[in-house]
């Protein structure tokens, strides 16, 4: 991917694009990939970096959602389990099967969680990746050596998926680019209007050089997640808000606190959620919270109260008790939850997605979760084809392989990180990274793993730009 070439491509284009996608997160890039592989001319614009919002700030799970099963949202679980299987097949270089263990401190818990996870297995059907089973005390301790053992009655093991969210996202963008999509980051939409022929006029501003220009499209897809209402208002000033916001926060610790390849699933927290302690890229990731927030921007700041909650909950299960001094990094993401009523309990709102088409033909796809991005994109592009009267082939992304990046070359950037100078050069030269933070946060995950090491590397990475 080459940003300047794509900017030039936009400026030189005289015909409307078939589709302009606004938003460079999972759903937006998914839409661009879907549209391009159907033979459509597609432009994607993102006002910041690809994945700079919620799509880089997930709990790194590709899963059906055990909690959603408990809430009775069977349709969402079924959809997500199908998509989990597709992701494992289409992007095996970055998505893998992960073993999870639910510790049980009574025979009743073993029975309750054992039955619940058998239902989860059954719902997976042909997409099953393995069966859950009940573990003895010794088996549980062997798989989770960092677990508190007092009163332990055993555990329940089940399988789900895990991934590196923005590594997958960047690879999706590269794949879309190879199929002819034009993707540009740091290019924001200033306004939307209609021309006499019914095409959408999209006014753009380049935040790199502050230049502005316009392009047109037969149909526009709004895939801006938590920011979708602002774009909807550009198209229709009478549009009422359809999303509310919830923050999900995480902390990252040393692998020493969970020295195993298995993940710990804490089935009940004080706020009625589940919590995960997961091995991720050589570290231990703990999350997540579910806290209402008034604006999307407030969804990206971890609060002291959430840190306390995560530590206290983890300490109830971990033998080695982490403290604030042990935290290597924190991050939070905002969830766009579709809601037309006021609510203070965002954990009860569905994670299902919804599609909206306004009177000017703007297609908005919002809600959902990372695991279901592909199906969300398929539905959004289907709608765009209908709205725009476009000639397109059938969706192929159910079996479309996502390109894997080449093997890393060069010297290690840091002895505690798996990334090399070759990763940095590829990020700047081939993956459209524009800033040091693009590299340290999203092309690599150094900032998310250890903020101190990221600070050490800023000058070195900047010199390679």
Image (cartoon, helix red, strand yellow):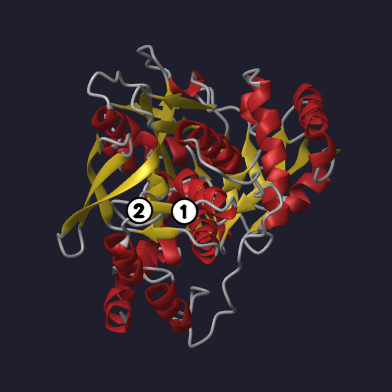
Q: Nearer the viewer, mark 1 or mark 2?
A: 2
Residue occupying the point 32% across, 43% down:
300
Q: Is residue 189 above or below residue 259?
A: above
Closest to the observer, 348 or 284: 348
Residue 325 appears in the figure: yes
Left or right: 47, with 71 as reference point:
left
Task: Where is residue 262? Give x, y as percent.
Answer: 69, 52
Task: Where is residue 344? Give x, y as percent.
Answer: 37, 16
> Would you say the residues marked 1 and 2 are in contact, meaning their CB atoms lie under 8 Å apart?
yes
Left or right: 11, with 2 as reference point:
left
Left or right: 196, with 160 as reference point:
left
Task: Where is residue 25? Give x, y as percent.
Answer: 43, 48
Comes first in the chain, label 1 or label 2? 2
Closest to the observer, 389 or 93: 389
Residue 319 appears in the figure: no
Disc marking residue 453 = none
Disc marking residue 41 = 1
Q: Which image quarter: residue 359?
A: top left
Closest to the observer, 85 or 148: 85
């Amino acid at each position: 991917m080459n940003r300047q070439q794509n900017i030039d491509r936009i400026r030189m284009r005289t015909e409307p694009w078939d589709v302009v996608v606004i938003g460079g997160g999972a759903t937006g890039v998914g839409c661009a990939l879907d549209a391009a592989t159907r033979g459509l001319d597609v432009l994607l614009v993102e006002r910041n970096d690809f994945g700079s919002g919620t799509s880089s700030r997930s709990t790194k799970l590709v899963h059906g959602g055990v909690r959603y099963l408990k809430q009775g949202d069977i349709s969402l679980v079924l959809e997500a389990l199908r998509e989990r299987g597709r992701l494992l097949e289409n992007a095996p270089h970055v998505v893998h099967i992960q073993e999870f263990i639910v510790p049980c401190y009574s025979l009743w818990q073993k029975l309750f969680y054992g039955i619940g996870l058998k239902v989860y297995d059954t719902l997976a059907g042909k997409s099953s990746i393995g069966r859950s089973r009940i573990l003895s005390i010794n088996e549980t301790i062997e798989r989770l050596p960092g677990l508190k053992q007092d009163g332990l009655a055993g555990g329940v093991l089940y399988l789900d998926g895990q991934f590196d969210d923005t590594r997958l996202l960047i690879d999706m963008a590269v794949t879309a680019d190879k199929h002819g999509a034009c993707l540009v980051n740091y290019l924001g939409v200033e306004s939307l209007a209609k021309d006499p022929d019914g095409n959408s006029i999209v006014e753009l501003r380049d935040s790199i050089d502050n230049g502005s220009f316009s392009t047109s499209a037969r149909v526009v897809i709004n895939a801006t997640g938590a920011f979708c209402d602002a774009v909807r208002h550009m198209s229709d000033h009478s549009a009422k808000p359809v999303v509310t916001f919830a923050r999900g926060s995480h902390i990252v610790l040393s692998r020493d606190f969970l020295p195993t390849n298995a993940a710990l699933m804490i089935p009940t927290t004080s706020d009625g959620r589940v919590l995960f302690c997961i091995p991720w890229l050589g570290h231990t990731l703990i999350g997540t919270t579910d806290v209402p927030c008034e604006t999307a921007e407030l969804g990206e700041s971890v609060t002291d109260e959430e840190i306390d909650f995560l530590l206290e909950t983890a300490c109830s299960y971990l033998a080695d008790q982490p403290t604030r001094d042990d935290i290597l990094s924190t991050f939070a993401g905002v969830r766009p939850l579709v809601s037309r009523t006021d609510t203070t309990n965002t954990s009860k709102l569905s994670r299902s997605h919804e599609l909206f088409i306004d009177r000017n033909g703007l297609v908005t796809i919002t809600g959902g979760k990372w695991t279901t991005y592909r199906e969300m994109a398929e539905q959004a592009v289907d709608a765009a084809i209908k709205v725009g009267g476009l000639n397109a082939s059938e969706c192929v992304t159910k079996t479309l392989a996502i390109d894997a990046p080449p093997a890393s070359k060069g010297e290690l950037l840091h002895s505690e990180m798996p990334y090399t100078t070759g990763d940095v050069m590829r990020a700047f030269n081939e993956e459209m990274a524009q800033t040091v933070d693009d590299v340290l946060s999203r092309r690599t995950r150094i900032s998310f793993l250890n903020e101190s090491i990221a600070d050490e590397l800023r000058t070195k990475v900047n010199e390679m730009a």
